[in-house]
Image (tube, rainbow, N blue to C red):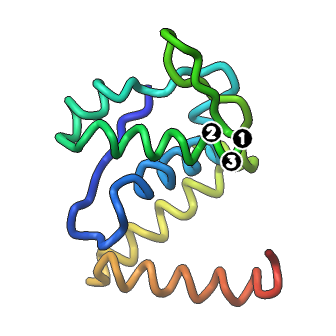
């Protein structure tokens, strides 16, 4: 089951963090159509956030057509995103690269900036 991690120092709204983490899980194949998202109560117990925040995130995912709420049953995945499985060799290579970056003293934001600049270079013009 997906476990959301809330970073209160990120500057990103909490509901958007849930939306983003769900998108990531969908892209990596960790969530598939038919899977049930954690209930709002489960997310609240694990993260100590307001239940309305969870519901707002789930409504956004529903608006995007990615999940559907089933009365009395929960919220279920309807669609997937992308094709980057969590066990991809590319993920392993990226993990190795990240270990080297940390070993060389780069901070998380440094790594993010480098990665973003490479993404921009190679995907410029893509929507």
Could you tell me how far apart the alpha carbons at marks 2 and 3 are, in whole angstroms? 5 Å
Q: Give the quarter of the figure containing the C terminus.
A: bottom right
The residue at 46%/86% (across/down) is 113
**Which residue position holds label 3?**
64
Classify 112 as above or below 61: below
Packing grade of label 1 (10 A; few <14, some 14-19, many >=20) is: few
Q: Gap in Å between the C-alphas at discs 1 and 2?
A: 5 Å
* CA separation in Å, label 3 and label 1: 4 Å
Residue 100 is marked as: none
Q: Residue at x 71, y 90 (%)?
A: 121
Q: In the displayed structure, does residue 29 sit left or right of residue 112?
A: right
Image point (29%, 70%), residue name: 10
Residues marked 1 and 2 touching at CB (< 8 Å): yes
Against 83, residue 68 (above or below) is above
Label 2 sits on residue:
62
Q: Are marks 3 and 1 in contact (CB under 8 Å)?
A: yes
For label 1, the SS is loop
- Relative placement, left or right, of 32 versus 37 is right
| CB under 8 Å between discs 2 and 3 | yes
Viewer-proximal residue among 12 and 30: 12
């Amino acid at each position: 089951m997906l476990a959301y991690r809330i970073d209160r120092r990120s500057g990103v709204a909490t509901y958007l963090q849930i939306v983003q983490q769900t998108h990531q899980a969908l892209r990596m194949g960790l969530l598939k159509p038919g899977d049930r998202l954690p209930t709002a109560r489960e997310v609240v117990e694990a993260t100590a956030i307001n239940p309305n925040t969870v519901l707002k995130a789930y409504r956004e995912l529903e608006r995007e057509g990615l999940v559907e709420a089933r009365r009395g049953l929960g919220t279920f995945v309807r669609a997937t995103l992308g094709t980057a499985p969590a066990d991809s060799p590319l993920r392993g290579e990226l993990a190795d690269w990240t270990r080297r970056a940390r070993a060389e003293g780069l901070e998380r934001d440094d790594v993010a900036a480098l990665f973003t600049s490479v993404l921009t270079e190679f995907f410029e013009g893509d929507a």
